[in-house]
Image: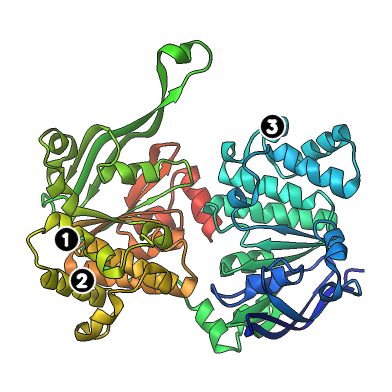
C-alpha cells in the first residue's frame, strides 16, 4: 500500500484574470510519503497546493489532481466539502490568524469531530483531549478551555495540528507550519509531525522555503520558480547534486560572514551600556487582592550589556525570553530599573531633563515585518524623510529630498542618485519584501544614528533576499562604523553578523561571550539545545 500513489497531479495550471501564475506542473505523492514543495515567495507553491481543494479565491484552475482515483478538480463544491478535512486536511502558516478568536481551541476541534465523525458533544470532548494530548500539549484539559490568544505560538500550532488530524486525513497539507516558531519549537513541531505521520500512515505535502527543514523531514523535494516546477527527486539526490541553477542558488543562499573582526579598544567609548537592567510589567492578581494592588512580571532580570563602536551584539532566545523587551528598553520605549545609556547619555536622566530627542537620533530601529512598519498611506519620500522633519527641521524641501535619494542609493535601491526621484512618489505596496526592508533601513540611516536595533530584520524574508539584506547591513557597518543590537532566534544570522552574543531564557542572561565561543562551545544546556536545533 505504501507504494500506491495517493495524489497524482498532472498539468496543473492556475490563472487569475487570464494571467497564468502556475504553468502546467506535474507531481505525485505516494501513501505515507513526505513531499516538500519549496521555492521563494511568489514561486506559486502555496497557490498550487491550495488550488487542489479550490481554496484560492477567483482562481481559474485546470489540469487534473487524482486523489485515490477521484479528480479533485472535477468535483462539485458539495463533493469537495466532503474531501476537505476528511481526506485532506491543512495546517496553515499562522495559527493565530487561522483559529477563531471567539471560540476555545477545544470547541473548535470538537466541532470538526461532530461534523466529520458524527460524535456526540461528550464523545467529541473526550476525543479532543486525546488529540491534544497526542500533540504533547501540557495539561490538555486546561488548554482545551483556552482561547487562541491565551496559548503560546507553539501551543497554538499544536492545537492546529490536532484539529487537522481530527478526521484522520489521508493527506496533510502543511503550509509553512514552523515559520512563525522559534528554532527549538521548529524542531519539536517537526518531530511531532513525523511521529504522527508514522502513526497515522498519512502522506504530507510540506510547503516551505526552509531548506534545513526539508533536509530533516522530507523524503522527496520539488522545487518551484515563477510557477514552473524546475526540479524534483529524492532529497539526498537534489541537495547533493542539484541540476537546475535555481536549486543551486537556493542551496547556496546561506548567510555569509563579512564583518570586521578587530577587537574593540579597551577603555574606549561604548555605544550602548546596560548594568543591572530590569524591566517589570504589572500583572493583575487573582481574587480580591487584584482590587488593591498589582503583581509583577519581571521580563528582563538584571542584564549587563556592552556594545562597542562598529560591533554587533546578538541577542538570541525563544519567544518570551525577554529579548524584544530588552530591545524596547534600549530604544527608551519602556520604563526600566538599573543603568542604561546610549553613547554615554543615560536614558532616565534624558527623560527627566526633557532631552530625549537628541538621544533618539543616536539610536534607530529596523523592525521584523517591513510591510507592517511602513505606513501604506505615505509615499517613499515621506516615509524615509520623516526623521529629518523631526531631527533636522531646518532643511529645505530640496535638501531633504536630496538626502532621501542618497539614502535610497546607499541601501541599493537606486543605481543613479540623479534618477532617484522616480521612486519618491511610490507607496510601500509597490515594492517586494526585500525592497521594503531596504526602505526601512534607509529610514533608520537617514538621521545618521550610532546604533541600530535590528529586531528579527530578515525572518520575514526568503533565503536569497535574507542573504542580500544581511550583506547590506554588514557593508553599512564597515563603511559607517555602525553598532548593531541584533535580536533574533536564527542561529545562522547570529553566526554571520554578531561579534558578541547574549543568550536569554525567561528574562535572564544564561550565557554570553564571543560568537564563535558561544556557538561552537556552548556551556549552558539551553544554549546547547538552541545550537543543536539549528544544526
- Specify which label sits upstream in the sequence, 1 or 3: 3
Is residue 60 placed above or below 478 in the rendered structure? Answer: below
Evaluate if marks 1 and 3 touch, with contact meaning CB atoms under 8 Å apart: no
- Specify which label sits upstream in the sequence, 2 or 3: 3
Evaluate if marks 2 and 3 touch, with contact meaning CB atoms under 8 Å apart: no
- Specify which label sits upstream in the sequence, 1 or 2: 1
Q: Secondary structure at mark 1?
A: helix
Can you tell which of label 2 and label 3 is closer to the viewer? 2
Q: Compute the Cα span from label 1 to label 2.
A: 9 Å
**Disc 2 target residue:** 404
Q: Residue at x 26, y 46 (%)?
A: 331
Q: Residue furthest left?
A: 394
Evaluate if marks 1 and 2 touch, with contact meaning CB atoms under 8 Å apart: yes
Q: Secondary structure at mark 2?
A: helix
Crowdedness of circle 3 by 10 Å Cα count: few (<14), some, many (20+)?
some
Q: Compute the Cα span from label 2 to label 3.
A: 52 Å
223 to the left or right of 485: right
- In which quadrant of the rendered view does residue 348 lie? top left
Question: What colour scheme does the image use?
Answer: rainbow
**Disc 3 target residue:** 145
Q: Residue at x 46, y 67 (%)?
A: 461
Q: Secondary structure at mark 3?
A: loop
Is residue 308 placed above or below 480 in the rendered structure? Answer: above
**Disc 1 target residue:** 388
Residue 283 visible? The answer is yes
Amino acid at each position: 500500500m505504501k507504494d500506491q500513489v495517493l495524489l497524482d497531479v498532472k498539468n496543473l495550471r492556475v490563472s487569475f484574470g487570464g494571467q497564468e501564475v502556475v504553468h502546467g506542473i506535474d507531481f505525485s505523492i505516494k501513501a505515507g510519503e513526505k513531499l516538500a514543495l519549496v521555492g521563494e515567495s511568489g514561486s506559486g507553491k502555496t497557490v498550487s497546493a491550495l488550488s487542489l481543494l479550490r481554496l484560492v479565491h477567483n482562481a481559474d484552475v485546470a489540469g487534473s489532481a487524482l486523489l485515490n482515483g477521484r479528480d479533485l478538480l472535477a468535483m462539485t463544491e458539495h463533493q469537495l466539502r466532503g474531501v476537505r478535512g476528511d481526506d485532506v486536511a491543512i495546517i496553515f502558516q499562522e495559527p493565530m490568524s487561522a483559529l477563531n478568536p471567539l471560540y476555545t481551541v477545544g470547541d473548535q476541534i470538537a466541532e470538526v469531530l461532530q461534523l466529520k465523525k458524527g460524535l456526540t458533544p461528550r464523545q467529541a470532548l473526550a476525543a479532543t483531549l486525546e488529540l491534544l494530548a497526542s500533540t504533547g500539549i501540557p495539561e490538555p484539559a486546561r488548554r482545551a478551555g483556552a482561547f487562541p490568544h491565551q496559548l503560546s505560538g507553539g501551543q497554538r500550532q499544536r492545537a492546529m495540528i490536532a484539529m487537522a488530524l481530527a478526521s484522520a486525513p489521508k493527506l496533510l497539507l502543511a503550509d509553512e507550519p514552523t515559520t512563525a516558531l522559534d528554532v527549538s519549537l521548529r524542531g519539536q513541531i517537526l518531530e511531532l509531525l513525523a511521529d504522527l505521520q508514522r502513526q497515522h500512515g498519512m502522506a504530507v505535502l510540506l510547503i516551505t522555503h526552509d531548506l534545513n527543514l526539508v533536509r530533516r523531514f522530507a523524503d522527496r523535494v520539488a522545487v518551484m520558480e515563477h510557477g514552473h516546477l524546475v526540479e524534483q527527486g529524492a532529497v539526498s539526490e537534489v541537495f547533493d547534486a542539484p541540476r537546475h541553477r535555481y536549486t543551486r542558488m537556493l542551496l547556496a543562499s546561506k548567510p555569509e560572514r563579512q564583518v570586521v573582526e578587530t577587537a574593540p579598544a579597551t577603555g574606549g567609548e561604548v555605544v550602548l551600556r546596560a548594568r543591572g537592567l530590569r524591566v517589570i510589567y504589572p500583572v493583575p492578581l487573582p481574587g480580591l487582592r487584584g482590587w488593591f494592588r498589582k503583581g509583577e512580571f519581571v521580563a528582563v532580570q538584571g542584564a549587563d550589556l556592552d556594545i562597542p563602536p562598529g560591533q554587533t551584539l546578538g541577542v538570541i532566545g525563544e519567544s518570551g525570553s525577554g529579548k524584544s523587551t530588552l530591545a524596547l528598553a534600549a530604544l527608551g520605549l519602556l520604563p526600566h530599573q538599573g543603568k542604561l545609556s546610549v553613547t554615554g547619555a543615560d536614558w532616565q536622566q534624558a527623560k527627566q531633563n526633557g532631552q530625549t530627542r537628541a538621544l533618539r537620533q543616536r539610536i534607530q530601529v529596523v523592525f521584523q515585518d517591513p510591510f507592517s512598519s511602513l505606513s501604506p498611506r505615505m509615499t517613499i519620500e515621506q516615509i524615509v524623510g520623516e526623521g529629518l522633519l523631526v531631527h533636522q527641521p531646518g532643511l529645505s524641501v530640496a535638501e531633504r529630498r536630496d538626502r532621501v535619494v542618497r539614502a535610497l542609493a546607499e541601501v541599493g535601491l537606486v543605481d543613479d542618485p540623479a534618477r532617484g526621484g522616480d521612486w519618491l512618489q511610490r507607496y510601500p505596496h509597490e515594492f517586494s519584501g526585500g525592497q521594503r526592508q531596504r526602505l526601512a533601513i534607509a529610514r533608520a540611516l537617514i538621521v545618521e544614528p550610532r546604533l541600530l536595533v535590528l529586531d528579527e530584520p530578515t525572518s520575514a524574508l526568503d533565503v536569497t533576499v535574507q542573504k542580500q539584506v544581511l550583506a547590506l547591513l554588514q557593508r553599512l557597518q564597515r563603511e559607517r562604523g555602525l553598532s548593531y543590537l541584533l535580536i533574533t532566534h536564527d542561529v545562522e544570522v547570529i553566526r554571520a553578523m554578531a561579534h558578541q552574543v547574549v543568550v536569554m531564557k525567561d528574562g535572564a542572561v544564561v550565557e554570553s561571550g564571543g560568537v564563535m565561543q558561544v556557538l561552537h562551545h556552548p556551556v549552558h544546556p539551553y544554549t546547547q539545545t538552541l545550537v543543536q536545533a539549528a544544526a
